[in-house]
Each structure stands twice: as structure tokens, then as C-alpha cells.
Amino acid sequence: MSFFVDENTRLIVQGITGREGTFHTEQMQQYGTNVVAGVTPGKGGTEVLGVPVYNTVREAMERHEANASVLFVPPKFLYGAAYEAIMSGVPLVMTIAEGTPVHDMLKLHHLAKEKGVQLIGPNSFGVISPGKAKAGFMAHRIFSKGRVGVMSRSATNCYETVFLLKNAGIGQSTVVGVGGDMIPGSTFVDVLPFYEKDPDTDVVIMIGEIGGSEEELAAEYIKKYVTKPVIALIAGKNAPKDTSMGHAGAIVSPDGEGSAESKEEKLRAAGVHIAESTEDILRIVKTLV
Amino acid sequence: MKLLEYKAHEVFHEYEVPSIKGFTVSTPEELERVDGKLEYPVVIKAQVQTGNRGKAGGIKFAENRDQLLKQGAEILGMSIKGLEVKRIFITEKVNIDKEMYLSFTMDRKTKLGVLIFSPEGGVDINEIVEKNPEKVAKVILPAGEEIDDFTLQYVIDKTGLKQSYHDEFKNICKKLYRMYVHYDCLLAEINPLVITSEGHLKALDGKVDIDDNALYRHPNVKEFRDEITENPLVLQARGFDFLYIPIKDRGNIGVISNGSGMIMSSIDLISKRGMEVTCALDLGGGATADRIQEALKIVASNPQVDTIFINIFGGITRCDEIAEGVQQSIDEIDTNRLVIRLEGTNKEKGLQIIRNIGGNIELVDGLYEGVDALAEGMNK
């Protein structure tokens, strides 16, 4: 087993006719992902890489019984595309774009919750279950199949980690990019239950960073409900206050909310292993697997 | 994007948030036109993106036309903390009975809006919370485009605001919230929200912070963005779609990387070894050689920087493009040390290009090896 994406995934690519959409559709197909339909308004009736294109998600859903959608659309159009996917009954919606307005995400976050939809991202590389399928743009060659789960706010820190894991012969079950924005569709707390339930995951790595309270909330959740070992890295300890470090969400507010210290303290109290660096993650994983 | 005071007043005005009357002036000649439109005494305030303007002489009072022309011209010519005063904002002096605080922002925990109101205001909100936490109402708002009466009544009851101000308070909250939503604000703050001696509620000063990612919806404020950016290197970088982040005034290392997470990790590891990063530049994904050349020039032009660490884990970003960018810029930068780590797409091709450049470029295999190399160099 694995979750979110695997051999049973029937994926829609929204924005399939765009440059990025087409390129990554081909990459996803080569990796073994079953892309059943594409959606680009105005391009319905055409075909890309053998995949039929529709004007609406609704029609794509009706004809192909898809169970997931990935959005290769610019941030300006993310709200509209995600709204359409959620309202058309797609149970899993993965968003990629960086630069989505915060107020758009505030609305989408609650809409997805209300409709029972798993919304992933944005500002995310997507989701990959190595050896099975991927939805997103991650450089899949550095991932390998195994029993370690990884969820990350940062793409590059995640790459660095799975690269070190792969070189050490340690593979991953499912890797989720929760994304670097202020308001993620799904938070660490939303993803944790999937790892806890997944029989193919033995250890969970959580790559967090400064800003917001998701790691603190995850600590509370882990304390109560997670039995599997969790390793956490909090990036940005030495970042200046009140300065966004690139990810819109990676900002410590002037009153100190979102600091690395607060996150590490809460996580440690919840029994989470704190890693000082990506290399340190590897050291700890080796003691646990 | 944090708006300057005059611009914040403009958006208050647009959303009919009751605020004091004021005029914005950018040349001494325009001062003449303000005379007669406001009742004296007036307050003249320098419009620069920095605190403590008063202490620096950036806020003055004028009792009459002569003083207005003289003081206004003086402030227009000055610079505060290195920032040239291009505009001044002139308002009537208000007689104040009481200073309060009101803001809308978002709560990242619940992903909802939050209203913060304190009947004591005028100073920084953190200071208010520290001194009188029991007087501050912080109320999470139900999702929506409008704010309901019952929510506002709840706020009023929590803070004991006097009956005679209830209607005006509700009115101001509703308008400010509408503005907060429509303008994609991260923060819409009125501080102080004053009760005038005539018994009316007015916004005296405000802070408005608009989500950078939503600026395309607000062209009327976007055009002022570059004007309020203090750091010329931030501006230069923005011109190439890079993010330049000043880290520490001290320090001698500049970090270039292709992602926010990797930048933070680099800074963390470097700091842990007792070294200091002065600035970082995020290339984002898929930068080409020509753009990388510019990125290197921007970081190298910071006089603090004598060492540059390029740390790339390329997915969309190709290592050979990075290497070519280094090659193109190598004669134009006078940095003492250049430590380069390349991983990912087209790594071998990139390494070969770097090796061919020769010189004293230090190639390292891995982030930790890079930080080691930096530390060894510092010890020499």
C-alpha cells in the first residue's frame, strides 16, 4: 500500500496543453502514472501525448472516473482551477504553482475541508510514491522505493534528504510536498494519519521550517495519535525576523510566532526526533530502520 | 507590500473608512495648493518606510501658511536613515480624547481572519498585549466576505466599549474588513483609532500590508512597490525575478541557491560553524546562464561579500546552465572565494565547465562538504 498516488491512480492534468503541463505529463507517464485525461478550457476535443483533453473537469470525471487531479496552472488561475476540481467531485487535488494569493488559499482550504477533498499544495512539487506513480514535477530519479515516509514544506530540502537516503540504500513509501505557502491546502496534521495507517511506512520524516504553527499542531497530534517514529527538521533557525525567506510561509512574525525554537521544543516534548540538518536526518533514520 | 501612510489613507478613503483629512505633496510648489484646504494647525509627515520619523525631524507642525511652506519644503528635501523624502502627507491636527487599536489579519493556525481590538492604542500592538493582555480582544472570524453584527457585538461586549460609540465602531469594522478582503491584505491596521473630542471615531494612522502575490489585482498600489523598497540590490534582483534577502549587516558570505529551503539550510549550517551570511539570493527554478550571471554580479556587488557559496540541487534548474553563468561572470566579479556545489540535472556537464574555468574556484561534492570548505578557508 501507499497513499494519495499509486498504481490505482487515475489522474487528470489541469493545464495539460501548457508548456509545463505537457512536459510533466510526459514525465509522469514515463514514470508509470496513469494519466487518463487533460483539462484546458477552450482546448476540449484535442489530444496531448495520447491523452484526451476536455474543457471541463466535470466532463473528464464523467468519462474517465478519475480519482485525482494535478494542476499545472499559473498562480492567477489556481483558485478557479482548484475550485472547479473540488466542485466536480475530484477527491484529491494537487496544486503546484508558487505565488498563489493568500486570500485565495484561505477560501480553498475551507472549501476542500467542507467537501471532504484532500487538497495538496500549493508551492509544492506534488506527491510521489516511488516505483508506483507520481503527480507533480519532482525530479523522480533521486527517489527510491522503500518504507520511509517524507512530507516537506520545501522541495529542495526534501530532494537533499531523499538523495542522501537513496545513497544510503533507504527508500521511501510516499513523499508529499505540503508546500511552502502560508496557507497549505493540507497541513502536516492532515497528512500524518495517512502515514500512521499506511502499512508500508515505518518511519515518518517531517521537513518543516520557520513560520506559522503547523509543526506545533503536528506535535500535539503526534503526541495523541501517532505510534510510528517521527523525525523532524526545522529549517531557518538563523533567518532574520519579519523577513520572508523566499517561501511565502517561511516568516517569523515580529512577536516571535513561528520561530524554530518553539517548534523544536513542542516536537521534542511530543517524542519527535529533532534533526539538526538533512545529514542528521539520515543519521537518525539509520538508527530507526 | 507595506503601504506608506499616505497610500494607506488613500485605500481607507476608497473604502469609506472614516479617517482624517489629508493631502499628499511631492514638490514645494504643491504646498501652496494645500494652504486653505485644511484648517490650521496641520501636521506634516515625511513618507518614508521607516519608524521613528518624529525623532529624525520627519514630523512637524505648522500654525499658518508661512510655516507650512517652510516646514514642508524642509522635510521634502531631507533624508531619513538614508531614505530620501519624496513625499509628505499633511493632515489637520485632531483633538483626541482617546487612542484605540483595531486590526484585521489572518490566523495561520485556523486559516481564518482575526479581528484584534484594544480600547488602549497608540503604541505597537505587541506592547499593548504585553502591558494589558486582558484589554485586548482577539476574535477569530467565521470565513466570509463580510463581517456580521453578532461578531462585532461579541467584540464590543468583551472590551466594554461605551454605548455611544457602538454604531461608529461597527461601521468602521465592516468597512475595514471589506478593505482587508478586497485588497488581499495580510494586515489592515488602524493605530491609533481615535475618539475625537467631538466624539467621533476616526483612523488617524494605519498600516496596510498587501499580499505580494496578489498585487496583480491591485495595479493602483503595485506601481509604488519599487519606490518603497529600500535596498537597491533587492530591486535589481527583482528585475530578474530573483529574491535577494539581506540576512545580517555583518558577515562576509553570500549564498546563492535554487530554492527557499536550501537557502535556509545553507544559512543554518554555515551559522552553526560560527560563520556569518550577510545575504542570500534565491534563483527560483530553471534559471538560465544569462540570468545566473546577473545573480552572481548582484551578490558580488554587496561590499560585505568576499565569499560566495553557490549551492544547487537542480531539478528544473540545470547544473550546466549554472556553470555557464559562472563562466560568463567570472571576470566581472571580484569576490575572493567562490565555493560551488552542484547536484542534480546535468551535474557532470556542469562540473566539467567549472573545471575548465580553472582559477581558484572550489568545487565541492555536497552541502556539508561545501560548508566544511568555507570553514577551512576562514581558518586560514
Image (spheres, coloured by chain):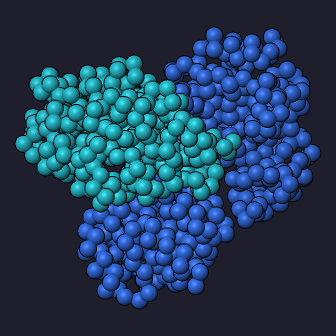
Q: Residue at x 75, y 47 (%)?
A: B89
Q: Residue at x 35, y 19 (%)?
A: A115
Task: Return the x and y of residue A161 as percentages of the image width and height.
Answer: 38, 54
Placement of B195 over or under B320, stated as above or below: above
Q: Quadrant of residue A282?
A: bottom left
Judge by depth and name the residue closer to the eye, A208 or A123. Answer: A208
Q: Colour of chain B?
A: blue
Q: Is residue A46 left or right of residue A166?
A: left
Placement of A136 over or under B163, stated as above or below: below
Q: Is residue A26 left or right of residue A179?
A: left
Q: Quadrant of residue A2?
A: top left
Placement of B296 over or under A202, stated as above or below: below
Judge by depth and name the residue closer to the eye, B323 or B89. Answer: B323
Residue B25 visible in the shown view: yes
Residue B100 visible in the shown view: no
Q: Give the farthest residue toward the bottom.
A: B359
Q: Residue at x 54, y 35 (%)?
A: A270
Q: Is residue A34 left or right of residue B116?
A: left
In the rendered image, which quarter contains the C terminus of chain B?
bottom right
Task: Return the x and y of residue A64 as percentages of the image width and height.
Answer: 12, 27
Q: Quadrant of residue A188?
A: top left
Q: Residue at x 28, y 32 (%)?
A: A199
Placement of B205 over or under A85, stated as above or below: below
Q: Give the farthest residue toward the left.
A: A50
Q: Colour of chain A?
A: cyan
Task: Return the x and y of residue A218 as percentages of the image width and height.
Answer: 49, 34
Q: Is residue B252 left or right of residue B289?
A: right
